Image (cartoon, helix red, strand yellow):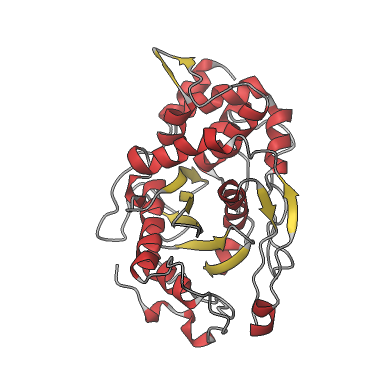
Amino acid sequence: MQASLIRTAVAQRPARVAAPAAPVIRGGPWTEPTYADSTLGDNVDGEDLDVRRAAVEALGRFNGSVVVVDPANGRILSMVNQKLALGAGFQPCSTIKVSVAFAALSEQVIRSANTRLPLGSGRIDLTYALAHSNNLYFATLGQRLGFDRVSYYARQFGYGENAGLNIPGERPGSFPTAPPRNGGVGMLTSFGEEIRQTPLQLAAFMGAVANGGTLYYLQCPRTAEEIQNFKPVLKRRLEIQDLIPTVRPGLQGAVDFGTARRAQQDEPIAGKTGTCTDSRTHLGWFGSFNEVGQRKLVVVVLLTGGRPAIGPAAAGVAGNVYRRLSESNYFSASRQAPVEVTPASLVSTRICCSR
């Protein structure tokens, strides 16, 4: 990929703008609405009611999906907008950069978080590049890795396969078999060009980053008996344990001073935003995990629609999930996870929805 194409890719990154008060968005026509009842058709049997309520209230009017997973075992605690979460997937935008960072470190294309690459008029390191989602940095890593190595690691991390174990209706997304025609491997590693990522795939991968490298099959128990007898199922161990301390400062930096500042809470949160346009659908991604004492949660948000559907807005939704759970003492060490099955009548946003 030529430097001019990379510069074009950087210039084409959608501007991050604040969500307007009204759902009439210029710049379309967009094929997906920005605002909708995202709970319609969901089956909430077996979900953690506290987590579900926090996720639905945090999502509010936005058209999107929120998936919350326990990274210690792969259990899905809540999946808002299951049709979207289980579907064919969308372009991952800049969330692909997390897997590219691990690939580059594994192959020693970069050796530490402080490895600086000469880019244009300056040099930046991995932590800054992740925190600020620098496209040129990750396009350069893609060029140095080459498509075959990028593809190998992406597939190890779960792209192109089901993230869940026997979850009805789940589709596996896809990963290209050759470099994209539009911009080659540089566009793939900076924007996720030609990749189809599902919220479940991103949740499973971020869970592995959160727990030290164990990629679990995600499971969604629906009955009290299934919850009581729940056992984690290993998909594979990822050789990233020693690399996580190198990548995590960039993910935490995104929240502390970068593109995900809207997710900031009193407790540490690490994550990666993504913003791009997939055909005529604007996308906002945020994949994240927190750590409060010995408890962690993975929260993935995908927003679809017009220009308000951006990564920073998705980060704000996730931040609200963490905040609401913290305020309800969800992370208290003495709290026991409920085993009762939530009633199907709680599927609708009518149980919540202040914005």
In what quadrant of the picture does the N terminus appear? top right
For residue 332, say whether it is visible: yes
Looking at this rendering, what residue extends furthest in the left direction?
A: 21
Q: In which quarter of the image is residue 260?
A: top left
Give the total number of marks visible in the rendering: 0
Q: Is 300 on the left or on the right of 60, as rendered?
A: right
Along the line of sight, which residue is nearer the eye, 109 or 305? 109
Whole-percent x, y for residue 271 in the image? 46, 46
Residue 289 in the image: x percent, y percent?
49, 52
Front residue of this view, candidates 15 and 129: 129
Q: Position of residue 218 (x, y in %)?
A: 66, 62
95 up-or-down from 79: above or below: above
Q: In this view, does 250 lie above or below 165?
A: above
| Residue 217: quadrant of the picture | bottom right
Identity of the residue drawn at 68% across and 68% down: 169
Q: Measured along the vertical axis of the image, is residue 178 above or below residue 321?
A: above
Residue 93 located left or right of residue 178: left
46 or 62, nearer to the observer = 46
**Would you place residue 104 above or below residue 251 in this image?**
above
Quarter of the image that includes the C terminus: bottom left
Nearer-the-camera pick, 142 or 204: 204
Q: Can residue 61 be seen in this view?
A: no
**Image location of residue 302, percent across then percent down:** 48, 55
